């Protein structure tokens, strides 16, 4: 029995001994294949340019590929074993591209050139914001080409000429035939438009009319517009027999028609006048023999064959009977300033009176808060009147004062001075703008005659100089605004005396 057991143990020990003899350690990890870069494209580019890197043994797991552009790390967008796509990272500079996968790295044979980024093409703004054909406009923004011909600018589709260029500024000329609209800019395939329109206007101009006053030249008379027809008369002429005449001028037909004479056969000068409900109201003035007048005469040009005159029942109650300034707003007429004869001279007042046509009544308003004045020049813009004082109690030789009257609040407000003190200027209003020019100023025995013509913008409270008609100078002229034009006539020149010329002014209009 003992022998049998020993043999069994020997047999069991044999396989154990054999197994232990075959254990020679763990199986080693396979060595990674070396990464290679065979090329990349493009060879240069700005930040965020997509670059394709070609090579061998890249990881197909994007995050296992570490790529740098001259030591600035980029983010992998896609990966295969032979192709990597990345964007040039912010902050990268020109240098080698390096790819690392695990412990294996490869560096490109050539540099990738990082180009300076081109600013996005933008139009930040432009000045001025409006103008005529040929106006120089400065456009600011970014991304402009320093090569002039690579920038293309158009005004509402009309190609413009470029005068000068920098990287962020273009100077261009508004092209002929351009109309109002956006400014468009294209540079090397990029295109943008301005956020706001550039407004194109026609050129304001004067045209001499082929007409002249049909009777003697006159001064200190009245002039007004009813239904698009200009009426002129009264005042002082070289022929006393014609001083009561009233003439009507149709600017569209370029014709004159004599209307009914003023019924008082005596010279009447320096009256105020305003228009209400198709009639002109001539207020006060001075008769050559009977002195200051308180009469109010209504002239209806559409009554009878040649118009009619009616003496109103209620006389003018104000003190400023001579040289008052008349204007109408809505259904009310107004007379401001003026003066009266004291027997030893004239006394100016700052009274303001309102006329109510419905009951033929006058109401005194708040006094004018500036200096006393007479022979002012009034122009109505919207619901307010604007008055050039002309002659004041502090300076009878001329004034630059320009005042606004708001009848709703019964308040006077001083506005931007007219450039240059003057009296005897002419003026009219068209499309919400006031126009004023010429006149003279007497100082230290010297007369200064003005040859200018200006436009007033109530929104900006500013004056701008426009082209004037071809006079050397003119005083005491009559100006009347029609729907789209202004008419200038009569007056006295500094060289040739009385003038019978008539001119039409056409303001700038938006195209």
Image (cartoon, rainbow, N blue to C red):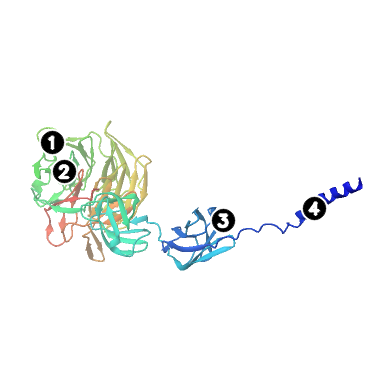
Q: Residue 144's quadrant in the figure?
A: bottom left
**Mark 2 / mark 3, whichever is N-terminal:** 3
Q: Nearer the viewer, residue 314 or 416?
A: 416
Label 3 environment density (alpha carbons within 10 Å; few <14, some 14–19, many ≥20): some
- Disc on res. 64: 3
Q: Is residue 239 above or below residue 103?
A: above
Left or right of residue 246, residue 511 in this image: right
How far from the left and from the top, in percent, is residue 246? 12, 43
Mark 1, residue position? 307
Q: Is residue 383 above or below residue 238?
A: above
Kindly state the secondary structure of the residue where label 2 is placed.
strand
**Mark 2 / mark 1, whichever is N-terminal:** 2
Mark 2, residue position? 230
**Mark 4 / mark 1, whichever is N-terminal:** 4
Q: Give the distance between the C-alpha atoms of the residues marked 4 and 1, in whole angstroms.
A: 150 Å
**Residue displayed at 91% across by 47% down:** 2
The extreme right residue here reads 2
How far from the left and from the top, in percent, is residue 215? 8, 48
Q: Is residue 100 above or below residue 339?
A: below
Q: Kindly indicate whether the residue at mark 3 contacts the one at mark 1 (C-beta within 8 angstroms).
A: no
Mark 4, residue position? 14
Q: Kindly indicate whether the residue at mark 1 contacts the one at mark 4 (C-beta within 8 angstroms).
A: no
């Amino acid at each position: 029995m003992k022998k049998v057991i020993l043999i069994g143990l020997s047999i069991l020990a044999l396989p154990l001994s054999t197994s232990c003899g075959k254990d020679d350690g763990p199986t080693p990890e396979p060595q990674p294949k070396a990464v290679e870069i065979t090329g990349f494209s493009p060879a240069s580019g700005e930040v965020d340019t997509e670059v394709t890197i070609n090579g061998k043994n890249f990881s197909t797991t994007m995050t296992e590929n570490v790529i740098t552009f001259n030591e600035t790390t980029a983010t992998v967008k896609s990966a295969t074993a032979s192709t990597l796509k990345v964007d040039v990272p912010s902050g990268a500079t020109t240098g080698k591209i390096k790819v690392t996968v695990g412990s294996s790295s490869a560096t490109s044979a050539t540099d990738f050139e990082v180009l300076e980024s081109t600013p996005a093409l933008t139009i930040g703004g432009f000045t001025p914001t409006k103008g005529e054909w040929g106006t120089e406009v400065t456009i600011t923004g970014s991304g402009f080409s320093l090569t002039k011909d690579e920038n293309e600018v158009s005004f509402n589709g009309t190609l413009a000429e470029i005068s000068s260029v920098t990287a962020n500024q273009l100077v261009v000329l508004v092209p002929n035939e351009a109309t109002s609209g956006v400014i468009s800019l294209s540079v090397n395939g990029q295109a943008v438009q301005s956020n706001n329109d550039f407004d194109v206007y026609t050129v304001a101009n004067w045209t001499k009319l082929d007409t002249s006053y049909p009777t003697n030249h006159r001064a200190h008379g009245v002039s007004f517009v009813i239904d698009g027809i200009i009426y002129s008369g009264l005042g002082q002429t070289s022929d006393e027999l014609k001083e009561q005449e009233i003439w009507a001028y149709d600017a569209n037909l370029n014709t004159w028609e004599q209307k009914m004479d003023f019924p008082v056969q005596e010279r009447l000068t320096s009256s105020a006048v305003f228009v209400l409900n198709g009639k002109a109201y001539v207020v006060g003035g001075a008769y050559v023999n009977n002195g200051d007048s308180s009469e109010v005469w209504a002239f209806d040009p559409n009554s009878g064959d040649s118009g009619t005159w009616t003496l109103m029942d209620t006389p003018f109650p104000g003190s400023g009977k001579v040289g008052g300034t008349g204007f109408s707003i809505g259904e009310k007429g107004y007379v401001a300033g003026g003066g009266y004869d004291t027997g030893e001279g004239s006394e100016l007042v700052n009274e303001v009176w309102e006329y109510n046509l419905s009951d033929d009544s006058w109401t005194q308003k708040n006094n004018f808060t500036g200096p006393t004045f007479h022979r002012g020049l009034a122009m109505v813009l919207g619901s307010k009147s604007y008055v050039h004082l002309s002659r004041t109690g502090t300076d009878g030789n001329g004034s630059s004062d320009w005042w606004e009257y708001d009848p709703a609040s019964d308040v006077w407000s001083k506005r931007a001075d007219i450039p240059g003190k003057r009296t005897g200027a002419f003026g009219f209003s068209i499309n919400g703008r006031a126009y004023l020019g010429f006149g003279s100023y007497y100082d230290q025995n010297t007369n200064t005659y003005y040859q200018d013509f200006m436009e007033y913008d109530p929104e900006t409270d500013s004056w701008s100089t426009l082209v004037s008609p071809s006079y050397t100078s003119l005083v005491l002229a009559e100006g009347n605004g029609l729907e789209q034009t202004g008419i200038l006539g009569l007056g006295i020149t500094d060289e040739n005396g009385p003038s019978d010329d008539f001119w039409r002014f056409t303001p700038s209009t938006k195209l």
